[in-house]
Amino acid sequence: MADAGSLVRRRREARQEVTGARWQLRLQAGLGGVWGVLAGLQWVDGDTSSWLRWGWVVLAVAYLGIAFTWRRRLGRAKARLAELSVVDLAPVTEAALSRLIAAALHGVAADEVTPRVTPGERWSPERVEWLRAFHRERRAGLDGPAREATWVVVEAAGDGERVVGAARLRRTDEPGVLEAGLWLVTEARGREIGRAAAELLLQRAREAGASTVRVGPTAAGLPPLLGELGFATVTDGERIVAERVLHDRA
């Protein structure tokens, strides 16, 4: 994916394809109907041998055939639009990072996103800079110095899109095990966005060759969403974490 707006562009293109196919279907079916009416009028007039009548018949059949082709294309276009998720994970470009920070400042508590680099629970310039540096230092991905990759969570909304959180994967010292993390702004929680983003994150882990994805620690117990996604609690030293074994590695 090229940038945070790619999901919206794909959805817009798919909607345009649906609109164009629907317009062509109506146009061709309408023309076929017109030619059919003209052929019928020739029949009513008793002119059954007129070349004009048969010309109308040929045109009617031809345009109705074209309409049928556009009907099938419309069905395929609708199917492609339905397949496009309304949630995606996009690279943290500078533009996406600025939008992520704006979303964090207005939609999530600082303690949920950053460590306490300054006293108090409020956002501070130091916390904002920590968040900015965190994502910049991880642009090299899982094989970079930080051994971690991050993405912004993008939600498509109408013809626009917005950044509603961030996701990450980090290599651990155990071969094939990746640690995952995800946060969303308060407004985006409880609306299936978290599930969609988590499923995409698991797919990224599979693509990276992971055999296990770990989330933790989970001192308060296994969150319901993780349980629904197939995670189970395990002991990792003195910590209790949630793990999902990726049997269907890709």
Image: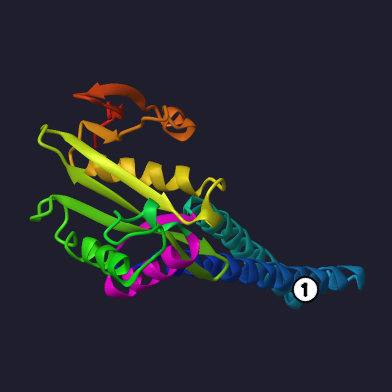
> Residue 72, how many percent across, how many down?
57, 55
Is 172 one of the magenta-colored residues? no
Task: In the rendered view, tell whether residue 205 sits above or below residue 239.
Answer: below
Residue farthest to the right, as pictured = 45
> Residue 152, how many percent across, how many down?
35, 60
Tell me which segment is drawn in magenta. Answer: 86-107
Tag 1, which secondary structure? helix
Could you tell me what secondary structure mostly forms the magenta stretch? helix
Answer few, some or many: residues within 10 Å of disc 1's Cα (few below 14, many 20 plus, some between 14 and 19).
Answer: some
Residue at the (46%, 58%) spot, across then down: 108
Instruction: Write down the quadrant of residue 33 in the picture.
Output: bottom right
Is 98 one of the magenta-colored residues? yes
Q: How many marks?
A: 1
Q: Which residue occupies the foreground of this view, 237 or 58?
A: 237
Q: Which residue occupies the foreground of this view, 181 or 119?
A: 119
> Residue 25, how many percent across, how many down?
64, 66
Kind of residue at badge 1: Val
Residue farthest to the front, as pictured = 119
Residue at the (39%, 41%) spot, across then down: 199
The residue pinned by badge 1 equals 34
Left or right: residue 204 compared with residue 85: left
The answer to whether any part of residue 10 appears in the image is no
Residue at the (13%, 50%) spot, across then down: 147
The answer to whether any part of residue 12 appears in the image is yes
> Residue 73, how many percent across, how many down?
54, 59
Instruction: Write down the quadrant of residue 240 in the picture.
Output: top left
